């Protein structure tokens, strides 16, 4: 079988596709910062959880899709916030993934509501009513 020889135009198109993929994905550094994790933790989780599969370019640079981010968010919640072991988190995701995802979404919504309520409480603490005549 003859090796495929790419024209310069084909190489440029391939590079454009690669840049496009990179633009719609997050680097490992960005994802690590999102979750306050080490990059090595993310690489380790890739091995432990099959649903975390970043795209890698020719140089081996990882790029995470939105789906990867959601899966990382789920693992992060189970392991870092709920204190589960990796094997426990893996089992929970295997046994009942829909319920686990639903519980995590509810938890995240409640956290946002709590944060919004705290902002309102601070605003009320700073509120000084004008005296009425």
Image: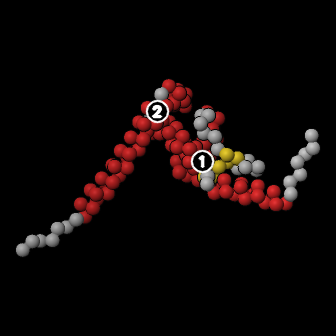
Quarter of the rendering containing residue 24: bottom right
Q: Residue at x 22, y 65 (%)?
A: 127
Residue for badge 1: 65
* Helix, strand or loop for disc 1: loop
Task: Say how the picture is coloured.
Answer: secondary structure
Q: Residue at x 58, y 43 (%)?
A: 68
Q: Can residue 83 be seen in this view?
A: no
Q: Position of residue 80 (x, y in %)?
A: 49, 39
> Residue 109, which numbered label?
none
Q: Where is residue 53 in the image (x, y as percent from the top left)?
A: 64, 40
Answer with left or right where residue 13 lies relative to residue 81.
right
Q: Is residue 94 visible?
A: yes
Q: How crowded is mark 1: few (under 14 residues within 10 Å), some or many (20 or more)?
A: some
* Helix, strand or loop for disc 2: helix
Q: Residue at x 76, y 55 (%)?
A: 14
Q: Position of residue 87 (x, y in %)?
A: 55, 28
Quarter containing the C terminus: bottom left
Residue for badge 2: 98
Whichever of callouts 1 and 2 sits on the residue coming sooner in the sequence is 1
Q: Where 92 falls versus 28 (above or below)?
A: above
Rounded to the nearest angstrom, the CA distance separating label 1 from label 2 is 20 Å
Answer with left or right where residue 118 lies relative to residue 107.
left
Which residue appears farthest toward the bottom when viewing the image?
133
Which residue appears farthest toward the left when viewing the image?
133
The one of 93 and 19 positioned closer to us in this rendering: 19
Q: Which residue is drawn at 55% across and 52% down?
A: 33
Q: Position of residue 60 (x, y in %)?
A: 73, 47
């Amino acid at each position: 079988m003859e090796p495929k020889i790419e024209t310069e135009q084909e190489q440029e198109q391939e590079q454009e596709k690669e840049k496009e993929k990179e633009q719609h994905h997050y680097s490992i550094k960005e994802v690590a910062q999102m979750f306050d994790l080490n990059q090595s933790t993310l690489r380790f989780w890739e091995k432990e959880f099959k649903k975390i599969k970043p795209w890698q370019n020719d140089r081996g640079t990882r790029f995470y899709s939105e789906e990867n981010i959601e899966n990382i968010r789920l693992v992060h919640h189970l392991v870092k916030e709920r204190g589960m072991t990796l094997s426990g988190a893996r089992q929970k995701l295997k046994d009942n993934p829909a319920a686990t995802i639903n519980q995590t979404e509810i938890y995240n919504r409640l956290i946002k509501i709590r944060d919004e309520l705290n902002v309102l409480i601070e605003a009320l603490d700073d509120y000084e009513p004008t005296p009425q005549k």
